[in-house]
Amino acid sequence: MLQAIKSRIRNLVITEKVTKFVAKVFLMTTISNFKNGDIVCLKHDMTKRFVVENNLVMNGRIQLSYFNEFSGVMSPALIEPKYLILAPKQEQFCSFK
């Protein structure tokens, strides 16, 4: 019963229908400062970019995905939020100007 309540609150947080405060009180877990869908990169290597899939911190890590060049698909990754920052905006390049 308790697990069902926790999973329901987790789903509400993921869809951003419940605030982080409510999730912290009921789930006793933390939520990263990143939002779902944010583009983040590694602090030490800003060329490595990831998309935040789930901003709930589970076992100290958040769920991300990145484009795997070898297989040509998006692959999952779990990384601690302390190693990530929001990626800077990329300039739009148009060669037709």
Image (cartoon, helix red, strand yellow):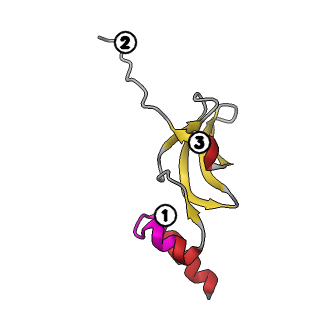
14 in magenta? yes
Relative to residue 61, is residue 25 depicted above or below?
below
Q: Which corner quadrant of the image does residue 30 belong to?
A: bottom right
- Inter-mark Cα distance, 3 to 1: 19 Å
Kind of element beneath mark 1: helix
Residue indicated by mark 2: 95
- Inter-mark Cα distance, 2 to 1: 39 Å
Relative to residue 74, is residue 59 depicted above or below?
below
Dots 3, 1 in contact, CB < 8 A: no
Which numbered disc flags the more N-terminal residue, 3 or 1? 1
Q: Residue at x 68, y 36 (%)?
A: 71
Which numbered disc flags the more N-terminal residue, 2 or 3? 3
Q: Which residue is drawn at 39% across and 23% down?
A: 91
Q: Position of residue 87 (x, y in %)?
A: 49, 35
- Inter-mark Cα distance, 2 to 3: 32 Å
Residue indicated by mark 1: 14
